[in-house]
Amino acid sequence: MPAFSDYNPIVVFIYFLTVAGLAMFIMNPVILGISLFGALICFRSRTRGKKDRSSGLFIGLFLLLALLNPLFHHNGATVLFLINDNPITLEALLYGFTSATMVVSVIYWFRSFSLLMTGDRLLYVFGKVSPKFSLMLSMSLRYIPLFATQARKIKASRKALGLWKEDNLWDAVKGGIRGFICLAGWSLENGIITVDSMEARGYGSGKRSFYSRYSFSLWDLGMLILILALTSVVIVSKAMGALDFGFYPRIGGELMTGAAAGAYACYTVLVLLPLGQIIREAGYGREKERKNGNH
Amino acid sequence: MVVIKNNRIRNIIKILIPFVLIPAAVVVGVFVFDDRSYAFISLVVALLSVLLFVAGFEKRRTGTGRMAIVTIMVALTVTGRFVPYFKPVVALTVITGIYLGGEAGFLVGAMAAVISNFYFGQGPWTPFQMLAWGMIGLVAGFMGEVLKKGRIPLAVYGFFSGLFFSFVMDVWTVLWYNKTMDWNLYVEALVTAIPFTAIYVISNVFYLMILKKPIGGKLERICLKYRL
């Protein structure tokens, strides 16, 4: 079984879209709990050994989002207490917590998404939709480090000429803008050289073929079918109302019906899919350690 | 590259997609997720509109030169986001729209959103950013003649595009958080965003005033020099 990050980028892309999409649009506390759990595990497993400095920020965001709702929504039958004659209700509070779980879990899914779907993989996916758009994206991505280097050169030469001052904010801004304008002039002329070179090699004269190092294997097909099957079970149960859960005016709806349990199970499997390889890798790592220890 | 030569087929596709796909998304949103899920509908509509534009662009013959100039403007925009105190995204998008046409403006705005989010974080907000910045560039292209002439229309355009961006992004914030439109929350989101909106508006107007002449002049000159 290939590592999850080694699957075809289209499969990984669809995986993240479905797993985050389901969390975004199903306001069911159990589904969202599973989603947050899976998102955190997936993200942690990608950043093993590294300390996550931003976790405090996300806890703060979670609390802010959770407590914001009862301050603005006063419907709900169970009044907890009053602030300025406005009732704070249990239902609004719970809705706030559910919403906050949704937002934070989706943000974590996208953080893992950014780690797994690096620029080249995303370009591969975009290239399937529009090769021209994808070419432009990859050209711009290449220009950014080039421009950063050139901007440093411009700054150095302006400094050497005595045209750079950073004594106060206004000078720094003015210098930055001047340098930026120089950069723009240089890069446009430079771009024309690129164009000449592309046209000399026959760009636009025929159908383009392009190289990609990703193939679509049977493993990819199997994974794709598994993802789509699990997703459709959850969507069908949602469409049949098995996952409906009401907050206003009273908390209502059964969380643990048979149909809902099936959907929860499917969603849990879906959420844990990226871990298949982690477990394998962990085993491999331990084996390696043991071998190294023996030597 | 596959180019649909038949104009009629191209026009039919252009009409069919927005009038079939987008309503389909709305219907699915109403039936599969309960009818209160405007967040789903708005996300799909935003994605489809961006896709529609990109697909339409794919079918058109654009000179290699224009394409390269657009990619350079995108890269400049993203590089600009890293310079401290320098947030020229809208200014450069508008200038591209004015001098190279609305389509180029849309592409610069939309691509700058995707690429800078590689560094600042992708999320469900990416399609909305693409759409908002893209529309600002597109409309600037339509109003090119007016914006080219005077400084006052340009300043007014910069002012309103800052407001527009903030208003669009806050609609999404509220829909995402609350599922349905809630005007109290929307007003609250707009109020908390006032410092950011002020930064957008001020930097838009400021950089449009400063950059229009040098960058616009360079674009005009390069188009003239190399007959793009």
Image: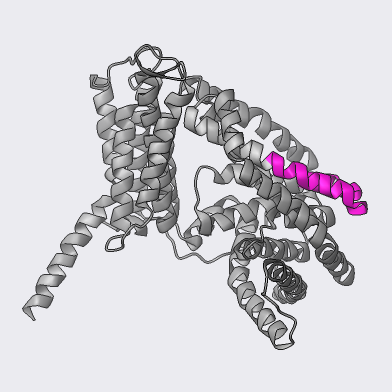
Residue farthest to the bottom?
A160
Please, is residue B33 above or below residue A208 in the view?
above
Determine whether B171 is above or below B36 in the image. Answer: below
The N terminus of chain A lies in which quarter of the figure? bottom left
Quarter of the view holding residue A270: top left
Q: Which residue does the image show at 42% across and 42% down from the upper left?
A: A61
Residue A19 visible (yes or no): no
* Residue furthest to the left: A294
Magenta highlight on residue B161: yes
Nearer to me, A214 or B145: B145
Q: Is residue A126 magenta?
A: no
Q: Residue at x 16, y 61 (%)?
A: A283
Residue B117's spot in the image, x, y percent?
Answer: 54, 54
Residues B54 and B35: in front is B35
Point out the image quarter for the C terminus of chain A: bottom left
Q: Residue furthest front?
A: A84
User: In front here: A269 or A254?
Assistant: A254
Q: With B140 as the anchor, is A110 left or right in this view?
A: left
Image position, residue A18 (x, y; %): 41, 39
* Residue B177 at x, y percent in the picture: 48, 32
Q: What's drawn in magenta, residue-wise?
A: B138-164
- Tell me: B24 left or right of A263: right
* B90 lies left or right of B122: right
Q: Nearer the viewer, residue B169 or B49?
A: B169
Q: Is residue A37 above or below residue B108?
A: above
Colour pattern: one colour
